[in-house]
Amino acid sequence: MKKIALLSITLNAVNPMTSYLLSKPDITVVNYLDSYLGEKIKADGTINDESMGRLLQMLTLACRDRADGIILTCTVFSPYIEQFQKLCSVPIIGADAAMFDRVGKHGGSTALLCTFMATLAPSKNQLAESYLRNGSEGTIEVFWLEDAYKALQQQDLKNHNDYIIKQARLLDGCYDNIVLAQISMADAAACLDLQKSRVFTSPQAAYELLLKRMEQEGIV
């Protein structure tokens, strides 16, 4: 049985990722959640020393608790994964980074759907870097789904998912790829029946990449 630590700054990311991982054999999940951190980043408009320190505390706890691997569900911290990895003794995966790598390997035109304003720029930058790293060509357009964000703040998951599904269907065929940036958007993908565009969500990509990294280090 392997222990995977999930580090999150919003409860909305916890359930979809936890449910996916627990559907896999020989996996136990330990959640580390700092919901204040998400509100702080939103209020500050950036990641500062205090918010970075709080995230590092969770990473330290996960390693001290003998996690075999760590998945970071918070998109805003994904650009720092390489630095975090240098500090920690176990594999660390950014859930969205794993997904963006898959999109980058396909290339083509991408509609990047986001429900958290602070993730717009870092998500687009990471995806653009993945295109370059994989030698792919294409375009990236970001869509800010404010109505879905507001619904999620009210814990109105039905409307949250409906707004995402509606937007994705409108974009079907206009782009090669439709990417749901936040883990909290993954449940909406189960109801998508797009005919032309590929849809990407992060739970599966994160799990498979972490498993690969763990195997490389002899953990699995």
Image (cartoon, rainbow, N blue to C red):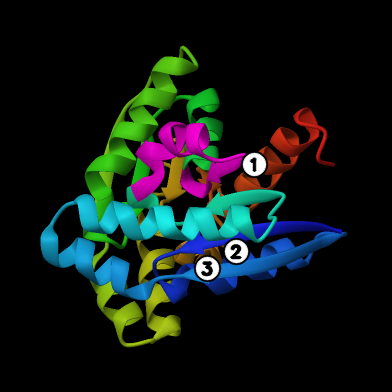
Q: Secondary structure at mark 1?
A: loop
Whole-angstrom CA distance, mark 1 to mark 3, is 16 Å
User: What amino acid type is highlighted by mark number 1?
Assistant: Val
**Which residue is pictured at 31% across the width and 87% down the height?**
154
User: What amino acid type is highlighted by mark number 2?
Assistant: Met
Q: Secondary structure at mark 2?
A: helix
The correct choice, above or below, for 49 with respect to 44 in the image is: above
Residue 23 image position (x, y, % from top left): 78, 65
Left or right of 143, for residue 9: right
Q: Which residues are magenta?
A: 77-96
Left or right of 118, for residue 104: right
Q: Nearer the viewer, residue 62 or 126?
A: 62
Marker disc for residue 205: none
Q: Which residue is mark 1?
A: 90
Q: Nearer the viewer, residue 106 or 57?
A: 57
Whole-angstrom CA distance, mark 1 to mark 2, is 19 Å
**Which is more N-terminal, label 3 or label 1?**
3
Is residue 67 in view from this perspective? yes
How many numbered marks are there? 3
Q: Dot 1: within a 10 Å radius of its alpha carbon, few (fewer than 14), some, or many (20 or more) residues?
A: some
Q: Which residue is mark 2?
A: 17
Residue 131 image position (x, y, % from top left): 42, 22
Farthest residue toward the top? Answer: 135
Whole-angstrom CA distance, mark 3 to mark 2, is 13 Å
Q: Which residue is mark 3?
A: 32
Q: Is residue 88 magenta?
A: yes
**Which residue is pictured at 27% across the width and 39% down the height?**
141
Q: Dot 2: within a 10 Å radius of its alpha carbon, few (fewer than 14), some, or many (20 or more) residues?
A: many
Q: Secondary structure at mark 3?
A: strand
What secondary structure prevails in the magenta region?
helix
